[in-house]
Amino acid sequence: MQKISVLGCGRWGSFIAWYLATKKGKEVWSWGPEEDYSYQVLKNTGKNEYVTLDKSITLTCDLAAAVARAEIVIISISSQGLRGFIRRIKEAADVSDKIFVLCMKGIEADTGERLSQILIEAGIAKERIAVWVGPGHIQDFTAGIPNCMVVDGYDTALKKMLADDFKSELIRFYYGNDVIGTEIGAAAKNVMGIAAGILDGGGVSTLKGPLMSRGAREVARLIKALGGSEFSAYGLAHLGDYETTLFSRHSHNRMYGEMLVKGQKFGKLAEGVMTAAAMKKLGNELGVELPITEAVYDVCFAAPQEGEDSRKLCMDRIAQLFSRDTKFEF
């Protein structure tokens, strides 16, 4: 039986541990830093708001032990912390024979690098790296509602092995065939989720149809400029994840955008904020037009002036998209 360690026991990490233990019968360890709130909740109660940890799952705060015993190391943390975290992992244990699976969606804001690139730069062999992304909310999965996801990577045999091994009646996997497009698309859908929330909060939800169409085209242009296939923007990692990100009440990024319009604070992680900054950086460097991304960036990072209405700030920025020159659609 494969030994798997899931590093990160927040929302998605706790679900992955639950899924692999209860649906696939894997020998799973779930790791979190001892001082972390998510870890403490699981340690003290054996559950969080999403899942109840199966008794077969070993919960630990010992990073060295969690990494050393694993054949497959699954990472599910905030994407902006990955660079420092992989250094900690390498200091904690020998990782030369480990398979790494990234269950994260983001782009490093400072560098514009994809998450797998960060692992490669840290000395992890790219043939041992895979990404697991795609649509689905934990609340739906734990209620028995199935969905489709994708496993991508640099080595065909590895991604086929993982997808075939992890599939169940709850998750149907596809093999990805464009790691650039898969990673960029998965991260970029969170930016579009914030845009959708802004439209909801601003009372113009009907614009989410055009957002889906033009957003996917925008992301396709960026993927192509980075050397990937623009068709990846229309796959499970991006367009296929729009329903759960642009429409679902469970979507953190959509809720962040809605609360932003209303001048309210959203207390949970919305990866799309820093992804918007990373995409704006890439667009500037590559000369790719990303009007929706830039609008999201502007409203996320331009705090309202004293006395300025948050709704007006957001909707004025959306209105600027309508003043752009008329163009051929394709």
Image (tube, rainbow, N blue to C red):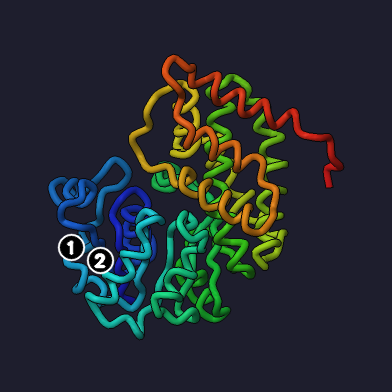
Residue of label 1 = 60
Q: Is residue 314 above or below residue 138?
A: above
Which one is in front, 8 or 259? 259
Residue at position x 70%, y 61% in the image: 224
Is the residue marked by circle 1 packed among few (<14), some (14-19), or many (20+) residues within 10 Å? some
Q: Tell me which amino acid carries mark 1.
A: Thr
Q: Residue furthest left?
A: 44
SS for callout 2:
strand
Residue 254: give x, y in percent of width and height: 50, 35
Question: Is tag 2's residue or tag 1's residue first in the polypeptide sequence?
Answer: 2
Residue at position x 49%, y 45% in the image: 272
Residue 101: give x, y in percent of width and height: 42, 68
Q: In the image, which disc is placed on residue 126?
A: none
Q: Is residue 80 above or below residue 324?
A: below
Residue at position x 53%, y 31% in the image: 197
Q: CA distance from mark 2 to mark 1?
A: 7 Å
Residue at position x 34%, y 48% in the image: 11
Residue 118 visible from this viewpoint:
yes
Q: Residue furthest front?
A: 306
Residue 144 visible from this viewpoint:
no
Residue 6: give x, y in percent of width and height: 31, 64
The quarter of the rendered structure image containing the N terminus is bottom left
Which one is in front, 296 or 302? 302
Is the residue marked by circle 2 packed among few (<14), some (14-19), or many (20+) residues within 10 Å? many
Residue 212: give x, y in percent of width and height: 67, 40
Q: Is residue 320 above or below residue 46?
A: above
Residue of label 2 = 29
Which one is in front, 265 or 299? 299
Q: Tell me which amino acid carries mark 2.
A: Trp
Mark 2 and mark 1 residues within 8 Å of each other at the beta carbon: yes
